Image: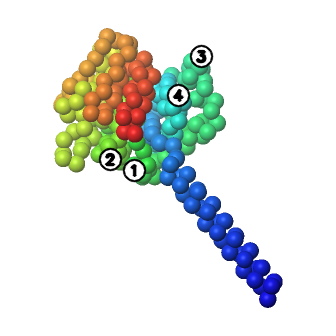
Amino acid sequence: MKQISNGIIIKSLLLILTITINMSDTNAQAKNPGKKKVLFVVTSHAQKGNTGEPTGYHLAEVSHPWQVLYDAGLEIDFVSPLGGKAPVDAFDMTDPVNKRFWEDSLYQSKISHTFKPAEINPSAYVAIYYAGGHGAMWDLADNKELALLAQKIYEHNGIVSAVCHGPAGLVNVKLSNGKYLVDGKKINAFTNEEESEVKLDKIVPFLLQDQLKARGAKFERSGIWQAHVAVDQRVVTGQNPQSATGVGEAVLAEIRKLQ
């Protein structure tokens, strides 16, 4: 009888200990539910029209916002129209931020194995960010799956952001009320003048500045290659590669307002 009683007592104590540990874990998770996540959109398109010239996402337009957000404790995931390895442009390892991103084993794996839009749960993200690079002009604007992700994140009180040619992904995003996301908002992107400067104004399928204005955007701009960031109603946009860090900082500031 004593052996049975001792066995019951030991089992009871173990059960109490297990319940206590589980309650502690639950309380800890409630206080620290995990890192907030930002979804980075990158192009799958690797060629500038029929020129034969390679393109893709602009590396610094990924690495610089990534550094700002990553260092603030956020987690970044990557999605592209086709999923898998995304083509990269402006591959400059003399830029220490590029180098840091490229040599990070976790994020090298993530950028080499991007999600497909159908694999993304938008409720998991506090913000979506469209990186530029000329490839974005060919495959982001008409991607309905990505547009729906942006709509859902925005209407769940999240932030939508983009830089340089990344706002191509915003031109066809519509809200539940039928209005374009950019309609009536201050928006910034690669300008017609900058497109002409790089001699691709006759190559890209449309001029981004013109298309955003046609969607009702209050287009802002600075001189060519000058950093410019516009923030309006949880939409953050930047003009060119020089604006990438500023966009990351503005997105972070908007995320902190949600806390």
**Amino acid type assigned to the residue bearing label 4 in the image:** Gln
Earlier-in-chain disc, 2 versus 3: 3
Which quadrant of the view contains residue 104?
top right
Q: Tell me, yes or no, if residue 165 can be seen here.
A: no
Earlier-in-chain disc, 4 versus 3: 4
Q: Write down the residue under mark 3.
A: 94
Q: Write down the residue under mark 1.
A: 123
Earlier-in-chain disc, 2 versus 4: 4
User: In front: mark 2 or mark 3?
Assistant: 2
**Residue 12 - label:** none
Q: Is residue 138 above or below residue 93?
A: below
Outermost bottom residue: 1
- Give the Cα distance between marks 2 and 3: 39 Å
Q: Write down the residue under mark 2.
A: 156
Whether label 4 touches label 1, CB < 8 Å: no
Q: Secondary structure at mark 2?
A: loop
- Give the Cα distance between marks 4 and 3: 16 Å
Q: Secondary structure at mark 4?
A: helix
**Amino acid type assigned to the residue bearing label 1 in the image:** Ser
Outermost front residue: 2
Residue 235: image location, x then y, percent = 31, 33
Q: Secondary structure at mark 1?
A: helix
Residue 183: image location, x then y, percent = 20, 34
User: In front: mark 1 or mark 3?
Assistant: 1
Q: Is residue 14 left or right of residue 120?
A: right
Q: Tell me, yes or no, if residue 72 can be seen here.
A: yes
Q: Secondary structure at mark 3?
A: loop
Whether label 2 touches label 1, CB < 8 Å: yes
